[in-house]
Image (cartoon, rainbow, N blue to C red):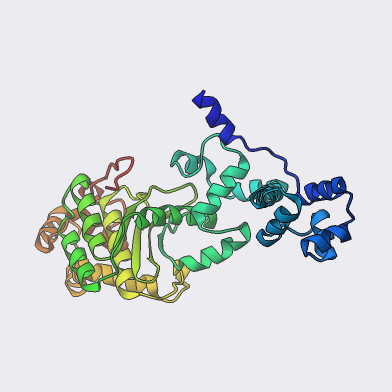
């Protein structure tokens, strides 16, 4: 029996009747004209006419007057009106089914289902609603405003282009996770100390450093989120502010080698330290506001010290022994030094990659 009751409670018809139709029937059964009823109920004839025609709702105040005159409880009238309003809202959404499907087609629906954001087997309308919820928008027309509100700075692949719709979904996945962390307000001093401690972990295994860096940064008001990439999100990482006084560093885990991973983290940390409250421009292709170069310089200085690294580069180091010795001297994994030298053009990208470590990420490295 309980299953039948539950099914009955969950049943939702796909039809509804405007309360004006019921009102017309009541008036007719009493043998009144609309004008006579309006006088008895203390309503204007125009209001009665528009309610019967379905162009005006039955308000709570009107429902009370109908109860006094007709004897049908006010909550029944307001219930009929609520059913009608919900029916009309659903009908409007169904009429926009093509718009729903076109909007969904812009996003990686299959992957969002796999990450339990959208429900497998749900209708297109239900998935559309779920996608709007993820993006934090009321209609597809608000999507451009969402993109502008993110004010995000990426460390981006220079080889492959990203799709802004996929990127927005990926960013909001990270934001959803960040909001679940109950971050305190950003504390610059604590974050600087956290970054310094994270620097000491570059020789540790993933299972050691990942939870520790997340915890350290969270205590300073910065969420470090490991969110695997979606299709057409060719990003290594992203940094942005959330609610003005909390920040997110989102790592895509596209980077398999440790030099990419650590450089990305320190680069994004540079944005957090240097660019609070700023709207960023992407420097890809040499166009932008210089924020990328500033973050690169900050990362280099935090990792090895800019002048110290410049002196080392002037020796044109090419041997494994020289790189290992310098890495030991500065307390970093030698793979990071290899990556930095390759970026400077001192080492070919094919040289000494054996010093790098390739990370094998768990399905969800987040704590």
Of residues 156 and 195, the one drawn nearer to the viewer in this rendering = 195
Q: Pick whichever, 124 or 64, lies toward us.
A: 64
Q: Quadrant of residue 61?
A: bottom right
x, y percent for residue 350:
30, 51
* Residue ID at (84%, 59%): 49
Please provide percent x and percent y for residue 248. Answer: 35, 62
Residue for point 13% across, 61% down? 326
Residue positioned most to the top? 1
Q: Is residue 214 left or right of residue 34?
A: left
For the question of whether residue 136 can be seen, the reply is yes
Q: Is residue 121 above or below residue 182?
A: above
Corner quadrant of residue 323: bottom left
- Quarter of the rendering containing residue 318: bottom left
Is residue 35 shown left or right of residue 202? right
Query: Taking 272 as reference, is 144 left or right?
Result: right
Q: Position of residue 239 (x, y in %)?
A: 37, 64
Q: Nearer the viewer, residue 321 or 216?
A: 216
Does the image show residue 345?
A: no
Q: Residue at x 44, y 72 (%)?
A: 280
Number of marks in the rendered image: 0
The structure residue drawn at horizontal position 26% and vertical position 60%, both measured from the top left corner, is 218
Q: Position of residue 68 (x, y in %)?
A: 71, 55
């Amino acid at each position: 029996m309980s299953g039948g009751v539950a099914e009955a409670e969950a049943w939702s018809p796909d039809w509804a009747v405007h309360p004006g139709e019921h009102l017309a029937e009541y008036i007719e059964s009493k043998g009144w004209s609309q004008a006579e009823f309006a006088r008895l109920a203390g309503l204007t004839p125009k209001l009665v006419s528009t309610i019967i025609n379905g162009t005006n709702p039955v308000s709570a105040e009107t429902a009370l007057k109908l109860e006094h005159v007709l004897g049908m409880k006010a909550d029944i009238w307001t219930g009929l009106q609520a059913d009608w309003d919900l029916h009309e809202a659903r009908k409007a959404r169904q009429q926009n089914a093509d718009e729903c499907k076109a909007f969904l087609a812009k996003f990686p629906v299959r992957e969002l289902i796999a990450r339990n954001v959208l429900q497998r087997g749900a209708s297109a309308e239900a998935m559309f609603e779920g996608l709007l919820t993820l993006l934090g928008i009321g209609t597809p027309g608000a999507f451009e405003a969402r993109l502008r509100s993110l004010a995000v700075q990426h460390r981006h692949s220079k080889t492959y282009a990203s799709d802004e719709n996929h990127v927005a979904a990926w960013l909001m996945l990270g934001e959803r996770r960040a909001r679940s962390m109950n971050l305190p307000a950003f504390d610059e001093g604590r974050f600087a100390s956290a970054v310094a401690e994270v620097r000491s972990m570059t020789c540790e295994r993933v299972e050691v450093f990942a939870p520790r860096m997340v915890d350290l940064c969270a205590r300073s008001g910065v969420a470090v989120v490991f969110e695997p990439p979606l299709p057409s999100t060719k990003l290594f990482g992203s940094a942005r502010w959330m609610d003005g006084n909390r920040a997110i560093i989102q790592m895509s885990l596209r980077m398999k080698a440790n030099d990419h991973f650590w450089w990305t983290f320190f680069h994004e940390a540079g944005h957090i330290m240097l660019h609070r409250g700023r709207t960023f421009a992407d420097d890809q292709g040499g166009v932008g506001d210089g924020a990328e170069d500033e973050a690169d310089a900050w990362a280099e200085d935090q990792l090895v010290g800019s002048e110290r690294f410049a002196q080392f580069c002037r020796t044109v180091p090419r041997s494994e022994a020289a790189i290992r010795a310098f890495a030991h001297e500065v307390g970093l994994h030698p793979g990071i030094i290899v990556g930095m030298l390759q970026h400077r053009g001192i080492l070919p990208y094919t040289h000494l990659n054996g010093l790098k470590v390739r990370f094998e990420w768990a399905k969800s490295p987040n704590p």
